[in-house]
Amino acid sequence: MIDIKELTILALEELKGNIARTTLTMLGIVIGIGSVITIMSLGEGSTQSIVDQISTFGTNVITVFPGKARRGPGMSGGTFDTLVKQDATAILELPNIEAVSGIVSGQKTLVFEENSVSSSVNGVEYDYAQIQSLEFSQGDFLNENDIYSMTRNVVLGDEIVEELFGEEAFVVGERVRIDRKTFKIVGIIKDSSSAIVPISTAQKILFGHDHYSSISVRVIDNQIMEQTLTNIENLLLKQHKISNPDNADFYLRSPQQMIESMSNVTGILTTVLSGIAAISLLVGGIGIMNIMLVTVTERTKDIGLLKAIGAKRKDILSQFLIESLVLTLVGGVLGVVIGTVLTYFVSTAMSIPFVVSLKSILLAVGVSATVGLLFGFYPAKKASELNPIDALRYE
Amino acid sequence: MKKNKNNPLIKFDRITKTYITGPVKYQALKGIDIEIYRGEFIAIIGHSGSGKSTTMNLMGALDSPTSGNYFLKGKNISHYNQDELAEIRNKEIGFIFQSYNLLPRTTVLKNVERPMLYAGYPEEERKKRAIEMLKAVGLADKASNLSNHISGGQIQRVAIARALTMNPSILLADEPTGNLDTKTAHQVMKFLVQLNKKGSTIILITHEDDIAVFANRIIKITDGLIESHDYKLKTTSFIT
Ligand SMILES: Nc1ncnc2c1ncn2[C@@H]1O[C@H](COP(=O)(O)OP(=O)(O)OP(=O)(O)O)[C@@H](O)[C@H]1O
Ligand SMILES: [Mg+2]
């Protein structure tokens, strides 16, 4: 029979009556919730950004690296020479494989007139464009003839073009120098920062070795990804005459794995930071309790009066509980708003997707309500147990 | 005035009250018998510290006696717990205190509505009845004022309006005019007299003779005992 609506109105009146104190008390909750929202949202945003990036490689693409598998999101093959052309050819024969391309890559400096930029240069086979679903903003990919006849043609990522030639430059037909050798630009890839040359050119002219830095494999059906990964692993073990998989001199990366390991890293980071933010919420909660205790003492005479006109213990208890609940909930909502705005600016600055997860908002509201109830309970209980005579006599 | 001797509204039977403050015990009431009947207008007088407020707190179910029995409408409420007493106060008793009658940061209307909130009345009815009561004390136009923005006499009238909302059996007023100037005090008293004429039972605590004179019967307390159940004032020049 407690009129929650009326008690909420009364609570708002009381809180409005002492606006400075209300604001300061709420600040603890606002900051706590605001930082939880910001951290969780940025965590989710950066995870999504990583997922997006990996997905642009295509969720159907498996990469084989030479050497020992390392923990974490390692990509570089180091200086192992265990992957060779025969491996790529053999993989192509497996079921569920659409295309395979060996890759020979390294870091090189690209020069155009006065400008230079260091970037990764990949020597690839013809199917590479299809495997990686490359899109071109100018020109086209290397043609099949280029691949094995060591032509000095190059396809550049648009980010390299921007550095070397400036924005919006039309550069197909222009020449750049790699290792003081002149290459003709035949195409520009969207959203890329690497340069692509024919694999034969990379092997003979740029890097001087035949072994692969990695092998890109496109599967037909990614529903049977696990099976395909196992097949490739078994095949390569056999090719390399290794009986114990622990001694493998290669390792496989599927996009799912990359997403998982990246998400793990951001997940751990988010958890740690959220923990720190939670401490600020705890401090906010203690602030609420402190102020509610002061409020109860200040309003002792009010409580006496209310008891005189018929307030029962539960009436007083619920009134003060609702007051601290309103305090923390309003603080929580403000925190959500401020956290969202902050997330917007930070994610724009970091150029990651702007996401505010519903999960973090629900969590924030739930947490602030819990803080209000938890830390408001003791003061409210104290108020409800005041003796009306003592309360009325209180000066 | 019709008295039904068999059916007192309030019956104190050998009531004592001992206050215990740490190691100090103080017996404020030393065994008093009082009977008050429906429709009476009683004034309780006595020197400061004689036990008037203690008596009123017991009558008003704000406190329980140390010994003795209190029958309200025939029911012994001496051993009721806090919440049961709260219910009695809500339904049976209307309080008018000397000071601090209203919640300061709340409107006059909300103050008057409050007892009905605790009684579980729906919002519509609370509002309707509160306005009715404010009309009765002539303050309907102050309904939306904050209660610390009205005068002392108006505060006491709002307190009366609130005391009446639940249609209580008894109006209890502890020095209701103590903070008012003589003119305003007399206005408030006349208002109480009118209420009594309409049937309200009123119990008033005062140490001023010119206030006590408005009552039909005066009970005088001295040092925690009843000195007289029907005390006659010596000077009666104030009777209006
Ligand atoms: N809650 C309390 N605890 C301890 N002693 C109290 C308490 N209330 C009253 N007393 C003491 O009991 C005695 C009677 O007090 P009471 O308030 O009933 O007197 P009163 O007749 O109303 O006096 P006044 O005219 O000054 O209001 C006084 O001596 C007072 O100090
Ligand atoms: Mg007194």
Image: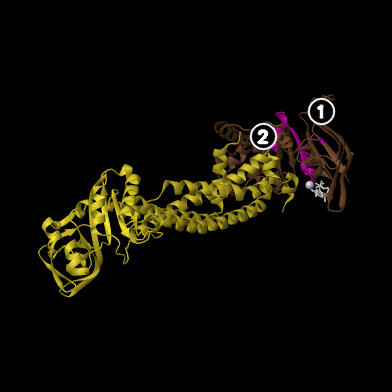
Q: Position of residue B97 (x, y in %)?
A: 71, 44
Is the residue A335 above or below the residue B89 in the image?
Answer: below
Which of the image's four quarters has the N terminus of chain A?
top right
**Colour in which the image shows chain B:** brown
Does A140 appear in magenta? no
**On the image, numbered disc 2 is attached to which residue?**
B164
Residue B214 percent across, percent down from the top left: 76, 38
**Hey, which quadrant is residue B11 in on the image?**
top right
| Residues drawn in magenta | B190-217
Within 10 Å of the Cα at label 1, are there few (<14), some (14-19), or many (20+) other Cα atoms?
A: some
Q: Which residue is mark 1?
A: B8
Magenta highlight on residue B194: yes
Q: Amino acid at mark 2?
A: Leu
Q: Quadrant of the C terminus of chain A?
A: bottom right
Colour chain A appears in: yellow
Callout 1 amino acid: Pro
Q: How many callouts does the rendering have?
A: 2
